[in-house]
Amino acid sequence: MRKLPQAASVEHSEMHQPVAGQELPHESAIKHVTGKAVYVDDIPEAPNLVHVACGLSTIPSGAVRSIDLDKVWSSEGVVDVITWEDVPGSNDVSPVYDGDKLLAEGRVEFVGQPIFAVAADSFVLAKKACQKAKIEYEKAVPFLDARMALENEEFVLPTRTFKRGDAEKSLVSSKNRLEGEQLVRGQEHFYLEGQVSVASPNEDGGVHVISSSQHPTEVQKLVASVLGVGINRVDAEVRRMGGAFGGKESQAAAIACLASIFAIRNGRPAKYKLARQDDMVQTGKRHDFWNRYWVGFNDQGLISGVEMHLAGMCGCTADLSEGIVDRAMFHADNAYFYPSVMIKGFRCKTNTVSNTAFRGFGGPKGMMAAESMLDDIARSVRRDPLDVRYENLYREGRDTTPYGQKIEQHILLPMMKKLEADCGYRARKVAISQFNESNKFFRKGLALTPVKFGISFTAKHLNQAGALIHLYTDGSVHLNHGGTEMGQGLYTKIMQVVADTLGINQERIIVSAARTDKVPNTSPTAASAGTDLNGMAAKNAAEIIKRRLFDFIVEAFEVSFDSIQLKGDKFFFAQKEWAFEEIISQAYLSRVNLSANGFYKTPEIGFDKEKGTGKPFYYYANGCAASEVVVDVETGEYRITQVDILHDAGNSLNPALDRGQIEGGFVQGMGWLTTEELLWDDQGRIISNSPANYKIPTAFDVPEKFTVSLYNEANTVDTIYRSKAVGEPPLMLAISVWCALRDVAASFTDYQESPPMNSPATAEQVLKAINWARARGVSQ
Amino acid sequence: MKLGINGSVREVTEDPDQTALSFLRREGMVGTKEGCASGDCGACTILVGREISGNISYQTRNACITPLNQLVHSHVVTVEGLADSGGLHPAQEAMLEKHASQCGFCTPGFVVSIAALVEAGEDSKREAVIEGISGNLCRCTGYAPIVSAGLCALRKKHRSSLKEKNLFARFKSDDAPRSEYARPLSETELQAGMRGSPDARLIAGGSDLMLEVTQGFRSIPCFIDLSMVRELRAINETDNQIQIGSSVTYSELEHYFEARSKPFLSILKRLGSRQIRNVGTIGGNLGNGSPIADVPPILLAWDATLELVDAHGNRRSVHVCEFYKGYKETQLQDREYIAKIRIPIKSMNDFHRFYKVSKRLEDDISSVMGAFRFESVGDEISLARVAFGGMAATPVRAMEIEKNLIGQRITNDLIRKVESQILEELEPISDVRASSRYRLEIAQAMLRRSLQEFSGQERLVITEL
């Protein structure tokens, strides 16, 4: 057997850096900065395209008595008007359980529910026409918040419980007991690109639909279903989204369905683009949660038993709330061991828009209960909250979650210790105490909190992915996979994986739009699992092609398989270098299949929903953050002055992109917990319905002292390049900000009590907590 | 009408309420995005260049609420027009280098806002960058890489092609004015226009008015644009007062008050965003009658008077105190406009403090705005102005409290007494911005703070930390 000289091979690998792990820019970055990246609304419109708008319910609950659309029909530029009776196939567009109606059928269940839809010559004419409908209702009594629904046992789905030991008994026998409750409000996604879809009729009675969706397969399925045609007649395509954050997982489908119905009815392309205010009223958001907890612990703050009730405001239908409330329950332990435990998750039905996925998928709400409880315990035993967190962290022997999964990788203790030292936590705590004692108008707070986030879809069947690679005769590569690009850099990472697997420069590769006719039956790009799943599937496809090429070389050049190398755009065998193109071209002439499908399914996972035990997660991603704030104690106004983050992305595939996810996720979480206040009035109308009254962070809100470090430790399970998912977990690092603000209020009780504080901690809420603490301070 | 777009001359005839954004996108310049259509997100940010007496300057604007007709003879530069034969603009290069785009949808807006700083030759300072992008929202990056990109862009060498001589000559023309979008240059022309088109809507920056079009989907068939009226654009000082033309923008006020009133400057810096301040005017802030506008409480504290003029040139003077009649209702009659705002110089020289509390610190509408002016003889208060926004259906002065302060020495007892009077004198509502209770608490805190500061206990507000 002939072998390449060892030295040459070593020298070469030193020259060629692996692409995976490099800080490549986002694959579309140049297009982004020059304005050349194309979003759905940027595609040139066909001259006969119609624009869609919907007439929305103005009451939260009741029967539709009559609909008079005469003036809508006669409005300028109107081409078509439909109600639910005009839907050719099914009027149900639910992702999992039935109930989400495309257009209201006799009953309305929230303010903003689409009742009829209009197609017109322009967007403005469609909107103007919608204003001319006359709709009469018979009003019913609405349920408008989780607490009210819970008291009336109004649920969209049955209540579930995780249980171990006898939590009640453990609480009774504990030396110390505490209870607490908190309202954690939801969040508007505020993706900068609103929901939008363009459907064009095809010759098979179906449509080609281009949308801004995290889930092209579901768009395809539901469009086929509302049209009453086979799935094979519909192609769904997504090149990129201008942000999604979970808001385009299930919510994009109805938009595509309405455009498709008009496209088919009129034989014209149809575009449905939501006006920002419609988007904020008509589409689902993060759930409000009303959390309650009862906890028993010893004088060190070590927890012996916990009972938690997590009540999610699901809105009027189930949508994805089964999994969302499950995930709140899965993360109600965050990183802490609860020896005896009972966690109940309630799925409350309210007459509000059906709430949906949002980065963290319920996890953040469960984690808020845990972290606020840990602070409460710490203050009651008069220890630093960080020490009580250490005390309760999962560790060897205390390593089983309330749902029976064993924690295998104990990485958080060393991470938190490192962050504690690096950010000077203890010294700053002392300095803050002194500052607070000597300052009349401002006080400071500091908190260091961990995140442990389970990675995998908790619905097992979604943990699969496909990819498609074509190698063309000039040596260029076309890559598709089931994942969608929403800014997270998925396409870049998958490109890196394929470049590395094939041993070629990434410039040879074009990653093109996700399309259901290229890679079918895909899962949503969600649950942080985009790279884990699609990266593995793409690697599989690349390996298949590589193997075929090597087999061809073995046969054509009579060399051994093991002697062949493919690196840096070159083949090495028979003691020679061969240009990549040359071998590809020869392989084509020898009739080698240069296209391959890849597939992946996550191993080992499985969870029994009814029993509430099993292994829902392949692994956990971890992180910790220390945040410092300064508060004006007379108005509650505050600034976040320093944030230090240490995050576990395993072997990062692209540290620049991962840092982007961490910083961006943190600031989005910070917005959720501080200035983003989702509010309804007593008539069930969303009053935070525009960017003028719903305030996401600006650059001014982000501190200058903001450090993000990656904890470079390989994933212990076999993920793509031993990396870890990074999409959702960083959002929850922002809980440190909320805890730091509450720390300021607690300072008025000399840190002996935890003032109640709902989320978001607006200046108003912070002042309320301070006033509570001041009153307690005086009474002591 | 003629204007320049990315260096090319364009002759356009569009509906008067057509926005610059819809025009640009229809013409294929789709790099400029629509994120909100209400001037709140900045995804549609464009550069608008003007040549005024030989000086060329560019400002950022929200294309979504800018009537295209307002851009006559200007040079509009979109994200597509920044890169030239020499390659990417420094703003683009820096955004690329710092990994500052994720989904990319807000990116063109940020690029344009940073390019405006580069074109203006700003120093590479964090404060300048943050102010420059104050009207641009990003939901992906958390801003840190964008701020780095801004700092980086301002350190790069740049030879601008946007200020070439004779560039603007090509965009100018002597075309006949359109009656549907009149652009009077003097008050005489304005009054004639108002007599000729009694139904025309007066527009200055349009940052409020255009929402009727983009959010309410109502047509406005006829405008008279105040933003070029010479007399309304001027700031004049006399011995005892300053006169500010109603079409003076917030950005211009920032410049003017920089050396004259630090408290006013600090409020101006939090009023809207850079894009809004470049177009929004002091007259608009008063004329729309909003109870939560930032400027009226300040003018109340300063005892400003407004000069109102009708279509026949009849002038009357109204104390700002009497200008507001009820919720969104003012003394302005049909076919009357605000010409000038007169502020006594003495007021500005007196002790004054202005405080604003809003849910978000930058680019947000006030929950409560407090404005205070005091004078003393010896250690007794001889003059007191206590004015609020967000505490009633109109901007208001707390007259009883003012009365009770006169002749008093500032003591803790006095402060406690007038604080409790806030609860008696004001009845704010609860809404999306704040509860009634919180509004009362912060109004009390503001009053207390102003008196403490007047008695020498100077202190910082949260945005100064």
Image (cartoon, coloured by chain):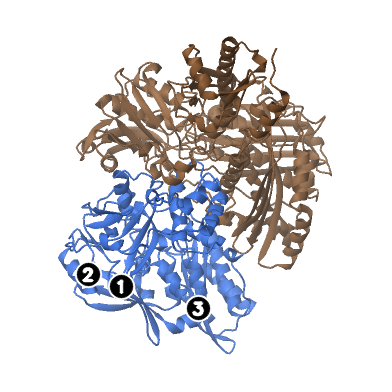
Q: Earlier in the sequence, mark 2 or mark 1?
A: 2
- Residue placed at 20% from the left, 52% from the top? B13
Answer left or right for A602 relative to A676: right
Q: Earlier in the sequence, mark 2 or mark 3?
A: 2
Q: Regarding mark 3 in the picture, which secondary structure is present there?
A: strand
Question: Comparing marks 2 and 3, which lies closer to the viewer?
Answer: 2
CB atoms of marks 3 and 1 within 8 Å: no
- What numbered label is drawn on residue B190? 2
Q: Regarding mark 1 in the picture, which secondary structure is present there?
A: helix
Total count of labels: 3
CB atoms of marks 2 and 1 within 8 Å: yes
What residue is pinned by disc 1?
Answer: B232
Q: Quadrant of the C terminus of chain A?
A: bottom right
Looking at the rendered structure, whether the residues under marks 2 and 1 are on a common chain is answered as yes
Which chain is drawn using blue?
A: B
- The Cα–Cα distance between marks 2 and 1, rounded to whole angstroms, is 10 Å
Chain assignment, label 2? B
